[in-house]
Amino acid sequence: MTFDSGLPTPQIEQDTDVVVKVLKTTICGTDLHILSGNVLTCDAPQRLGHEGIGEVVATGSAVKNRKVGDRILVSCITGCGNCPKCAKDFMGHCEDGGWVLGNTIGGMQGQYARVPHADHATWVIPPELHDTKTEDSLVMCSDILPTGLEVGLIDGKAKEGDSIAIIGVGPVGMATLLCCGLYKPKDIFVIDTNEHRLDVCKELGKANGLENIPMHIINNSKNDAIEQVLNMTDKQGVDLAIEAIGIPVGWYICQDIVKAGGNIAMLGVHGKPATINLERMWWRNFSFTAGLVHGYTTTRLFNMIVNGELDPSSLITHRMKMSDLETAYKQFKDAGEHKAIKILLENDM
């Protein structure tokens, strides 16, 4: 499932590969979706994990910009950089890559991992950042930060002065919130049923460009989030509703709070169908986007963290050893009980 036991040690298979010794990784909500059978492309047995940092221990003959000993951030998306899809920054649908790590090939939750197309899917971490809070923060650039920015805000056509609602503030929802400061929205609505996560969002609102943006914290434990948002927007709704849960209720909230001419951006991974109520929605001229992250903003986010312009370090609530992976999964699955957001795993094997 997620352990190295019984699985082959990764080797160079294509000349654009590198093999890394995994140093740091984490668990994603998508991993839980895989274990629930909601990602049909992933077959057991498989080593999961698509986020993290590793040290290069082997390189393919065509790798030009990475060498043995480099410490690199690995993207969840491995685009070849050459196909027509990659030419359009559509790396999630690369013709020889895309989301394969921890999905169709072994991932980062083990001692070693094979990373395809390493010249295009990795970033070298400067030595002065090794084993610092900044390096730990860079792990958030593997997936959740570019997902929030690209699939949530860019695909959702966010612009200055918009009202933005984030439905579900698990790790990827919080990452989306951190990136909202780049757009200077008029106000932000944060919706969840987990009081601890809502409290964390209040703290996130004190930095990362969010200090002067009104943030409305809505606990939906009474299923009244739609009513609350409409009451606070004079029944108009929001310009952009971002679905970051991956369950039908997230969609139902979005479709009822998006204003006429607004946008719904879905970045949650859905394993069950949900109804699009076009009989109630068609007249509102809304736009709807959904899909995979591509990673075209990763360099920008990487540099912002290194330069101190973005600080996602508070998303890391737990630090554990790779040998405790099973316990880490239990705590991440029961995140509300353990107040877990991101669990950083360090390879001790």
Image (spheres, rainbow, N blue to C red):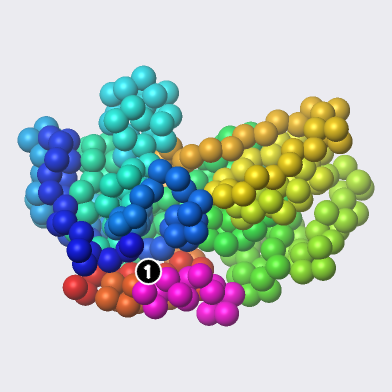
- Looking at the picture, how far across and down is residue 160, in whole percent? 67, 39
**Closer to the camera, 180 or 211?**
180
Q: Main secondary structure of the magenta part?
A: helix
**Closer to the camera, 160 or 150?**
150
Residue 226 in which image quadrant: bottom right
Q: Residues within 10 Å of mark 1 (few under 14, many from 20)?
A: many
The residue carrying mark 1 is 344
Residue 122 in which image quadrant: top left
Task: Please name the residue shown 21% across and 74% down the image.
Answer: 348
- Looking at the picture, how far across and down is residue 14, in whole percent? 15, 36
- Looking at the picture, how far across and down is residue 146, in whole percent? 46, 46
Task: Please name the residue shown 76% across and 31% down the image.
Answer: 286
Relative to 195, is 115 above or below? above
Q: Quadrant of the N terminus?
A: bottom left
Residue stretch in magenta: 326-339
Q: Is residue 227 visible?
A: yes
**Closer to the camera, 222 or 315?**
222
- What is the three-letter code of the residue carrying label 1? Leu
